[in-house]
Image (spheres, rainbow, N blue to C red):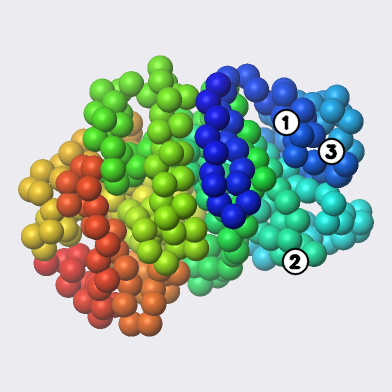
Amino acid sequence: MKRITVETEKPYEIVIGKGILKQCGDAVKEQFPLGNAVIVTDDNVESLYGDTVRKSLEKAAIPHRTFVFANGEHAKNMDILRELLEFMARHQINRGDFIVALGGGVVGDLAGFAAAVYLRGIPYVQLPTTFLAAIDSSVGGKTAVNLDAGKNLAGAFHQPSLVWCDHDTLKTMDPVRFADGIAEAVKYAVLGDEDLFAQLRGGELRQHIEEIIATCVKIKRRLVLADEFDYGDRQFLNLGHTLGHAIEKHSDFEITHGHAVACGMVAIAEAATKNGLAEFDCKERIAEVLALYGLPTKSPYPLEELLPYVENDKKRSGETIRLVIPETVGKCRLLSLPVTKLKSFFQI
């Protein structure tokens, strides 16, 4: 078992281990000895782990209710958020109570945003059950829902009180969804860990899953602590995400997050190379390791169809947008680019 402390204004612990979901009740009880829990999950995760979490909370004498919604990115919207807020109000949840987010990134984003805005803020706990959530979205306090205009355009920064990660839950994942997390692991490796890149390139993932989760979490912790509210260094975490989010949205979320980010990483590496900003083999190395895990390396859509989404990206500031440029594996930099030059940058 690994323990990692994130020392934000209100520090919290990330606990990573095998078979620890059954002990989540005791861990939560330490955080909230008197509060009531609202378990927020989707129908898929509910069928797999809902009873396990409820039994653990019952054993720890924590009163609880469960809010379940249909799985998928489409559910991360204002309508489901409103239903969740009304559910909590109807059951008289107060500031002494808390949310337990049980699931992947969609669950964590939605539940975290609800926790941020309900009664102007109540605590929440993350119980990630996907590889992507374990290494990325459960950590750092970014919460959001999607709008018709784009992904994650309504949200808040709201750090969890605890992240309790049982990597045994990853064994029940669909291979496509598991690969979404691999794309994010590759992102972390490209950002700043050549050893992690080599480990992934060697196919050594499942054998070292706890170590890899911890490595990715530590990289994210470093960037979050340097820039909690996303004005500077934290934006490195957007590597591959500018085009990735556009691909997701344009596909009506038929293309999943990690697969879209994989395409985005290769595209930005190719553009960086053509613009003289990256080493000659950067794109090939990234594409090689992504392909090893069955991830795509080319967008199915032409740039012209993606630009309207990119221009509405949350990383835009005025007439410029900030891109994460991979110079080589293990080293990236930020580049502010006029929106009017996006097309030429990617098509040079």
| Label 2 – label 1 distance at C-alpha | 25 Å
Query: What is the crowding at mark 1: few (fewer than 14 residues within 10 Å), some, or many (at least 20)?
Result: some
Q: Nearer the viewer, mark 3 or mark 2?
A: 3
Residue 270, placed above or below residue 6: below
Residue 157 appears in view = yes
Q: Position of residue 169 (x, y in %)?
A: 59, 26
Residue 188, placed above or below residue 235: above
Asked if the residues shown at circle 2 and circle 1 are in contact, with their CB atoms under 8 angstroms apart, the answer is no
SS at circle 1:
helix
Going by the numbered disc 1, the residue's amino acid type is Ala
Q: Nearer the viewer, residue 144 or 304?
A: 144
Asked if the residues shown at circle 3 and circle 1 are in contact, with their CB atoms under 8 angstroms apart, the answer is no
Quarter that holds the N terminus: top right
Query: What is the crowding at mark 3: few (fewer than 14 residues within 10 Å), some, or many (at least 20)?
Result: some
SS at circle 2:
helix
Where residue 85 sits, quadrant-wise, is bottom right
Which residue position holds label 3? 33
Residue 84, placed above or below residue 172: below
Which residue position holds label 2? 120
| Label 3 – label 1 distance at C-alpha | 10 Å
SS at circle 3:
loop
Where residue 23 sits, quadrant-wise, is top right
Q: Position of residue 77 (x, y in %)?
A: 64, 62
Q: Residue at x 36, y 50 (%)?
A: 261
Residue 172 appears in view = no
